[in-house]
Image (cartoon, coloured by chain):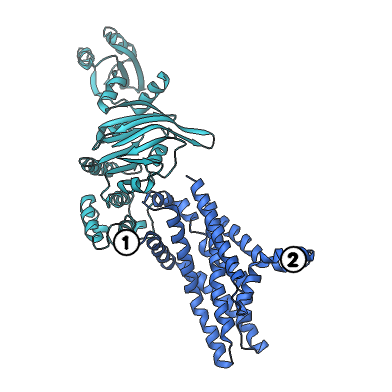
Amino acid sequence: MIKPLILCKKEVKDFFFSPIAYIIISIFLLITGWFFFSTFFVIDQANLRDFFSLLPIIFSFIIPAITMKSFSEEFNMGSYELLITFPVKTRDVLLGKFLSTILFIIIMLVPTLSYPICVSLVGNLDLGPVFGGYLGSLFLGAGFSSIGIFASSLTKNQINSFIIATTICLTLSLIDKMLFFLPDSIINIANYFSATYHFQNFSKGIIDSRDIIYFLSITFIFLYATNMVLYSKR
Amino acid sequence: MIEVSKLTKYYNSFLALDKISFSVPKGQILGLLGPNGAGKTTTLRLLTGYLRPSYGEITVDKYRLPGDDIKIKSIIGYLPESVPIYKNMIVYEYLFYVGEIRGISKEKIPERIMDIAKKCKIREIMHKNINELSKGLLQRVGIASVLLHDPEILILDEPTTGLDPNQILEIRDLIKEIGKYKTVILSSHILSEVEATCDRVIIINKGKIVADDSPSQLKNMYMGKTVVNICLHGASTEEIKNIFKDIKEIEQVRFLNQDDLNISLEITLSRDVREKVYKAIKNTPWILMEFYKNKMSLENIFKQITTEN
């Protein structure tokens, strides 16, 4: 098996052998479930718009909670020293941690498939936006994961790592809601930086290369920055 | 086997290692000795590729650091001081993980683990949680995990700190056993440790090599003097000073402890003339309670070496 996959397997095992994974998943399902079903019967429409519209903000808290331990804990316990003296490249370690987070997000999202199933039982559900929404969730998750991993590479302290990551993720999620006081010429540029703006295109069922490129760039930039941080630590 | 030349490491502007050079032939057990903050751990971290040198180069066989990091890492087994192995895993699971990451084929790992477990005497604890292990067992598991891929070079940072005396002996024996067919580099701040296990000692102080020799040579060089501790019953300090006057090898008499009956003292001799001291005491009516040659401590040697520099 190749190195990143071995590391990924170990990370996923770590997640699910500790109670944190189940706590995070429960909180995620509780929040999304409550927000979704509390308005679902009031609005009386067969769609998942409410679920997806809140996802960037919920992810801004949930994903940093998943990633906060990824490097911080290794630094804190000193196991990073062992890890780096194994014959692995820093980028293999990074990739392993990133893949494991993505896998965790997928596992976390699987139970939410019950929402579209429920909705399709009571109404006529348009599958396009649902499919787009879930695809977008993965891209959004990938972007935020790389931000979280970057934050955890900066510090030994998991709380600090969580706060740094949440701040960056929330900024990207809320930037489009703070644009009203800006001149029109800047709004478009600022809007491009908004994760919510790009994610909403997905959840409308529009799969546009610009949105894909946006999330892939964020993922790449922050993973690259993490690699630089790890390199500078040596 | 290992060639280190002009290795220098700065942490920001702090000079941790200053142009140190040494070479280690195959099959040698080398001890790095030094006080805390001398640069022992930094040296080991540079050798294992965890840190990058500011200047200088390390050659292991035909590979170089920095450059052939992965090649060198695959022939080295390194255990840091705090044994930072994953506490949430089970011993067997951890060893299996290390085997996988070290690139041992999956079919061979169980056999390899059993082999090493026998050597490190950890067969009975394979199914235990790592966080339940005692410090000694943890150290054994740590050593087992770095031996798993059969490295040619084993690097151990303070392998016996925090262990009880029995465990220290066990780990020493294990290291000696391993040293029969592998190159071992270990660091320590305890002289007796290095004396008991190593073929050669390098003393580092303030980032520089201040001595490089075999333990016995070093001892001779820096510990030519003999210190004898004596406890006498029924003597007085004046009388004691009097009877030792004639022994010209006595450099210093220091009274340590004194109660109504017993007097403890420490005598520094320029060479080992314990029989003269004994004979002098024998002619008196005092009772000899204690008489032993004191081992010179590392602190003393260090004081000597660092003042010489």
Q: Is residue B78 above or below residue B307?
A: below
Q: Is residue A8 above or below residue B205?
A: below
What is the secondary structure assignment of the residue under circle 1? helix
- The chain displayed cyan equals B
* Quadrant assignment for the N terminus of chain A: bottom left
How many numbered discs sit on the rendered protein? 2
Q: In this structure image, what is the colour of chain A? A: blue
Q: Tell me, for residue B93, which label it has, or none.
A: 1
Q: Is residue B301 above or below residue A80?
A: above
Q: What residue is rendered at 35% in x and 36% in y?
A: B188
Observer able to see residue A188 = yes
Task: Return the residue nearer the eye: A17 or A51.
Answer: A51
The amino acid sitting under disc 2 is: Ile
Task: Return the residue nearer the eye: A85 or B306.
Answer: A85
Q: CA distance from mark 2 to mark 1?
A: 54 Å
**Whole-percent x, y for residue B163 in the image:** 32, 44
Observer able to see residue A158 = no
**Whole-percent x, y for residue B177 in the image:** 21, 42
Q: Is residue A171 left or right of residue B194?
A: right
To which quarter of the image does residue B216 belong? Answer: top left
Q: Residue furthest front?
A: A209
Q: What residue is rendered at 31% in x and 37% in y?
A: B2
What is the secondary structure assignment of the residue under circle 2? helix
Q: Is residue A80 left or right of residue B265?
A: right
Q: Is residue B258 above or below residue B53?
A: above
The amino acid sitting under disc 1 is: Glu
**Whole-percent x, y for residue B94 in the image:** 33, 58
Query: Which of labels 2 and 1 is toward the front?
Result: 2
Q: What residue is rendered at 49% in x and 50% in y?
A: A230
Report the residue marked by disc 2.
A187
